[in-house]
Image (spheres, helix red, strand yellow):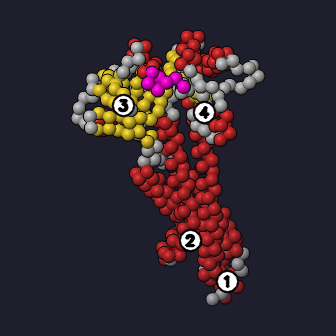
């Protein structure tokens, strides 16, 4: 019995595939909606999966025990919040020093400032580089590794030394084939001696992570003044102690800034998780919108499949009558047409998976955006397309099953 059922299933699949092959243009038009819908889903899921991993590994690279304190949010999502943060007092070097001294739950506290600057060596120059003023502790908390020379030391900061550490883009543009350690460069006209070169970090979302010059924090403030708000990085030393360190830092800063008990903080704290949660919300909304658009394509494709199956029922009326007169039950006829409609949709889903994967890889090649094609997404795409075929094949299959064999045999 099982063998007979499997033979009938295989025969129904063979008929569906033969029908597709016999009417190639009609088949392409029939499958177009399903192909577009599934390829859109595969491409979007692959792109979002790739971006999620990429953002976690290369964009938001704070450790699990590190948090940032700044004047306002590092990522602005609301214009009213942005305008409100502009009215806040600047975070100062003195507050950084107080936090470093008083926060017992903070293993490391660092301070940073940044701006854009032009970097020059001899006749060569790099425009619009990132100039950063760092305390030595920033390097101990970050993910940078030294390629040659050394990073900044506490003594460099204390004496406001005119020294710097450079990123790999500066090396490639100003010192091709030359060891830059010990050389002097001009940053916005000021002379700094290179004491170290960081290892190449590559790009993130198409933006280089190596076009920068780091000078001691005090050297930066000596040149550009103290009016710019300081950005602090704090390392708790243990992810389990992160909340305690944040609470302690918050109390110290609120006391120094004379924030009333009932008033909200006039500074902002961010962790790696807060950045990733924000990104997850953005990517989820993006996925939902595109998934709805792709679903419309699938519905259109399903309607086309239903229409083609109704045409098939009309074309094969005599065949249906003959099968019924030879003993085929209505359920057998219904099952045959359901298998055919789902097979047609599954073929469209298979082509959609192939096309969606090609689109995802093309985006990765041409736009330098990461993608990740997961097996579950491929299987989900095939299941979705097959389900569409089954759903929209119910009406044509039922219509075929209800045909009177005598009437069907007389049909021309």
Spot occupied by residue 201 in the image (x, y as percentages of width and height): 39, 34
Which residue occupies the foreground of this view, 108 or 374?
108
Q: Which of marks 2 and 3 is nearer the N terminus?
A: 2
Quarter of the view holding residue 255: top right
Can see residue 400?
yes
Query: Circle 3 — which element?
Result: loop
Which residue is at a point 70% across and 20% down the rendered structure image?
A: 259
Q: Do the residues labelled 4 and 1 touch (CB within 8 Å)?
A: no
Q: Which of marks 4 and 1 is nearer the N terminus?
A: 4
Query: Circle 4 — which element?
Result: loop
Residue segment shown in magenta: 220-227
Which residue occupies the foreground of this view, 276 or 303?
276
Q: What quarter of the picture does the N terminus occupy? A: bottom right
* Distance from Cα at disc 2 to Cα at disc 4: 50 Å
* Distance from Cα at disc 3 to Cα at disc 1: 92 Å
Q: Which of marks 3 and 4 is nearer the N terminus?
A: 4
Question: Which of the numbered marks, if any, corresponds to residue 189?
Answer: 3
What residue would you read off at disc 1?
Answer: 408
Spot occupied by residue 333 in the image (x, y as percentages of width and height): 65, 71
Q: Does residue 225 belong to the magenta stretch? A: yes
Q: Does residue 51 belong to the magenta stretch? A: no
Which residue is at a point 29% across and 33% down the rendered structure image?
A: 121
Q: Do the residues labelled 2 and 4 touch (CB within 8 Å)?
A: no
Q: Earlier in the sequence, mark 1 or mark 2?
A: 2
Which residue occupies the foreground of this view, 175 or 7?
175
What residue would you read off at disc 2?
Answer: 30
Q: Which of marks 3 and 1 is nearer the N terminus?
A: 3
Query: Circle 1 — which element?
Result: helix
Q: Are marks 3 and 1 in contact (CB under 8 Å)?
A: no
What residue would you read off at disc 4?
Answer: 73
């Amino acid at each position: 019995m099982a063998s007979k059922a499997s033979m009938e299933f295989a025969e129904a699949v063979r008929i569906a595939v033969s029908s597709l092959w016999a009417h190639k243009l009609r088949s392409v038009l029939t499958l177009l909606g399903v192909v577009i819908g599934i390829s859109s889903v595969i491409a979007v899921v692959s792109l979002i999966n790739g971006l999620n991993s990429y953002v976690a590994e290369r964009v938001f690279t704070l450790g699990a025990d590190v948090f940032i304190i700044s004047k306002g949010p590092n990522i602005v999502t609301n214009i009213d919040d942005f305008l409100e943060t502009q009215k806040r007092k600047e975070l100062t070097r003195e507050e950084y020093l107080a936090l470093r001294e008083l926060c017992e739950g903070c293993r490391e506290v660092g301070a940073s400032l940044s701006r854009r600057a032009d970097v020059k060596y001899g006749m060569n120059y790099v425009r619009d580089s990132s100039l950063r003023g760092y305390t030595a502790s920033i390097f101990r908390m970050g993910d940078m590794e030294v390629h040659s020379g050394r990073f900044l030391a506490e003594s460099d900061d204390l004496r406001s030394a005119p020294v710097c550490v450079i990123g790999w883009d500066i090396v490639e543009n100003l010192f091709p084939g030359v060891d830059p350690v010990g050389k002097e460069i001009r940053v916005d006209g000021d002379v700094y001696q290179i004491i170290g070169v960081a290892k190449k970090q590559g790009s993130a979302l198409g933006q280089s992570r190596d076009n920068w010059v780091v000078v001691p924090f005090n050297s930066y403030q000596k040149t550009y003044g103290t009016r710019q708000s300081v950005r602090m990085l704090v390392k708790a030393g243990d992810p389990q102690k992160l909340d305690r360190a944040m609470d302690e830092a918050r109390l110290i800063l609120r006391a120094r800034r004379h924030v009333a008990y009932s008033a909200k903080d006039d500074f902002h704290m961010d962790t790696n998780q807060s950045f990733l949660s924000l990104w997850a919300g953005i990517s989820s909304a993006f996925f939902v919108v595109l998934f709805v658009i792709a679903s419309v394509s699938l519905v259109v494709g399903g309607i086309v499949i239903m229409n083609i199956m109704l045409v098939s029922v009309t074309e094969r009326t005599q065949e249906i009558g003959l099968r019924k007169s030879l003993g085929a039950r209505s359920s057998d006829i219904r099952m045959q047409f359901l298998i055919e409609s789902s097979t047609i949709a599954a073929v469209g889903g298979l082509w959609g998976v192939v096309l969606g994967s090609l689109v995802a890889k093309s985006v990765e090649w041409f736009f330098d955006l990461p993608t990740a094609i997961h097996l579950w997404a491929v299987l989900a795409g095939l299941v979705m397309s097959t389900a569409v075929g089954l759903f929209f094949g119910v009406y044509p299959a039922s219509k075929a099953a209800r045909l009177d064999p005598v009437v069907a045999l007389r049909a021309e």
